[in-house]
Each structure stands twice: as structure tokens, then as C-alpha cells.
Image: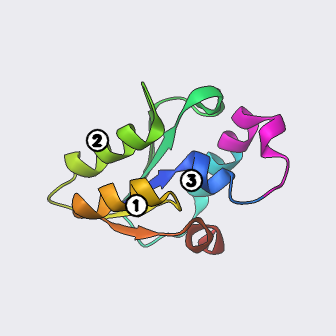
Amino acid sequence: MRVLVVDAANVVGSRPDGWWKDRPGAARRLHERLLVADVPHDLVVLVLEGQAKAGAPAGRDGHVRVVHAPRDGDAAILDVVRSHAVDQVTVITADRGLRAGAEVAGATVMSPSWLLDLL
């Protein structure tokens, strides 16, 4: 299975479009775009943290699963990567520390711009 894990905070934060004024709204818009996106993955896991968690409920909606990070988003993303160790996992982030941890766990890492270009 091909799994795409999205660091929502990093993707939303990659474009200065006023997202900081409405973090839940920015998360909702990203979630909605992922629901209709034509991505080459079987499952998309959108990881939300902090105020952004109010933008989309945790759980599965079609091919998109929303995870609400209980602590920080990076730890939740690495947990998702590890839970899909037998799958082909791609993580979307520009965070250097998360990138390194995801690669050590066996994931491929792509930039937020790669995902935004698909959307």
C-alpha cells in the first residue's frame, strides 16, 4: 500500500496566505483539497496539531484519515510512519528534523510544494 503522510502545519505554513489568522479554517481547506485530490497513494494521513485540530474531525473519510496529534505533530507523524513499516510511505514536510527521522524510519520525504503542485 502507498501511504502519504501530510505534516499539515508545515504544508499550510509554506504559503503566507493568512493561515495564521484562522488555523482551523486552513486545516479544513487542506483536508477538503486532499479529499478530492488525485494523488498516487492509496491512503492519505493528514496530521493536525494544536488549534488546527478543530478544522477536521479525527477519523477516516474516504481515502483520507485525519490524525489529531496528542502531543506534537512530529511525534504523531513518526508514529504513523512506524505503524506503516511494511508499506511504501511518503512524508510531506520541510522540517529537517522530521525529515531525518522519517527517512531513518524508512519513509521517502517530499516537500510541501510537491504536494501543493498536485492539489
Q: Which residues are magenta?
A: 16-28
86, 39: nearer the viewer: 86
**Residue 1 is at least partly visible in this image:** no
Q: Is residue 5 left or right of residue 25?
A: left
Q: Is residue 84 magenta?
A: no
> Which residue is the site of mark 1?
99
Q: Is residue 20 magenta?
A: yes
Nearer to us: label 2 or label 1: 1
> Which residue is the site of mark 3?
35
Amino acid on which the number 1 mark rests in the picture = Arg
6, 29: nearer the viewer: 6
Q: Residue at x 36, y 39 (%)?
A: 75
**Residue 68 is at least partly visible in this image:** yes
Q: Quadrant of the N terminus?
A: bottom left
Q: Residue at x 23, y 61 (%)?
A: 104
Q: Earlier in the sequence, mark 2 or mark 1?
A: 2
As drawn, 21 above or below 44? above
Nearer to us: label 3 or label 2: 2
As drawn, 69 above or below 89? above
Q: Quadrant of the C terminus?
A: bottom right
Which picture quadrant has residue 25? Answer: top right
Instruction: Pinpoint residue 112: horizontal percent, then vertical percent.
Output: 58, 65
> Which residue is the site of mark 2?
79
Amino acid on which the number 2 mark rests in the picture = Asp
Q: Is residue 33 left or right of residue 77?
A: right
Query: Is disc 2 placed on a helix, strand or loop?
Result: helix
CB within 8 Å, label 3 to label 2: no
As drawn, 31 above or below 16? above
